[in-house]
Image (cartoon, grey):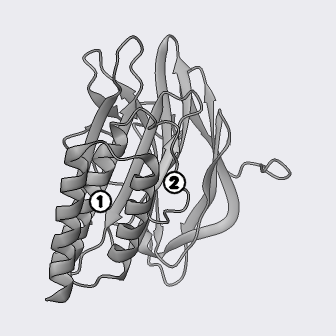
Amino acid sequence: MRRLISGILILAAVSSGLSRAQASQDDISGGLKKLFERLHAESLDSNRLRINDSIKLFIEDYVTSDNIFKGTFPEIKYLGQIVSSDNKIKIITWNLILSGEPGKYFCYFIRRSPGEPHNKIYRLTAAYDEGQIEADTIYTGSDWYGALYYDIKPYHSGNVQFWVLLGINYSNPQMTRKIIDVLSFSDDDKLILGRRCFNTGRSIQYRHILEYSVQAVISLRFRSAGSIVFDHLVPLPPSPGDERIYWGPDYSYDEFTLKNGMWNLKINADVRNKRK
């Protein structure tokens, strides 16, 4: 009961404070740090949901602030924040783990809008889903698969601007997924995830997905603006075949390289002495 009252008081205090005036960066940073610490320590779903509601109020104030592209809050462990090198896109993500229902992903894409007084903000949410993330389709803000994005690089194909994203998905308790995806925007400013530009030699995909055992650890990273390097995955004992819950790295590497707007896959790439 004491925890319940505490959660209600936090939500009420945040709502009251943010309704009076936009909080300072220090206020937001300190408030988010305390809320994420409480969220991590809390075990009851009902209280976790209330604390997460308070987190969303802080985030809403943060993403609409004038300093959104300047703030980082590195002291907050459970909040992901990345900014593209062209300073046009910022992504904020976190996830909420629940015991009695599927967990949830929360994501904000903040896009600079040249010639406009305010940034464009795209708010995405998704419930944990053990099902497959499709490699041959486009996703939008309304049917997003859910992920925590941890790196982003801009690139062009002709005169069109794109950003390639690296993310991770924990929705399946037996399998981890790492995702290479492409972000773009339609002429009417709709958010688009996916582009038919990943050439694996066997097919051309809208995104590339690495699926492997939750007990394995793999690397997926940018080697440069036009190179993405990742562990080569193989079935490991006792795998009976193509069950990805038994797959893991064999300590060789594969690489996507960018050429003429296409990301082309090379198996067993030599990346020695090239790590940054």
In the image, what residue occupies the spot 31% across and 53% down? 58
Compared with residue 125, is residue 63 higher up or lower down, i.e. above or below? above
Q: Position of residue 245 (x, y in %)?
A: 42, 74
Tell me, yes or no, if residue 103 can be seen here: no
* Residue occupied by mark 1: 55
Q: Nearer the viewer, residue 242 or 125?
A: 125
In the image, what residue occupies the spot 46% across and 36% down? 67
Q: Secondary structure at mark 2?
A: loop
Q: Write down the quadrant of residue 177 in the picture.
A: bottom left
Label 2 Cα crowd, 10 Å radius (few <14 / some 14-19 / many 20+): some
Compared with residue 228, is residue 39 higher up or lower down, i.e. above or below? below
Q: Nearer the viewer, residue 232 or 57?
A: 57
Q: Position of residue 274 (x, y in %)?
A: 81, 47
Amino acid at dot 1: Ile
Q: Is residue 180 left or right of residue 256?
A: left
* Residue occupied by mark 2: 73
Give the alpha-carbon distance from disc 1 to disc 2, as whole Å.
Answer: 14 Å
User: Residue lying farthest right?
Assistant: 273
Amino acid at dot 2: Phe
Question: Mark 1 vs mark 2: which is more N-terminal?
Answer: 1
Q: Secondary structure at mark 1?
A: helix
**Is the N terminus in the top left, top right, bottom left or bottom right quadrant?**
bottom left
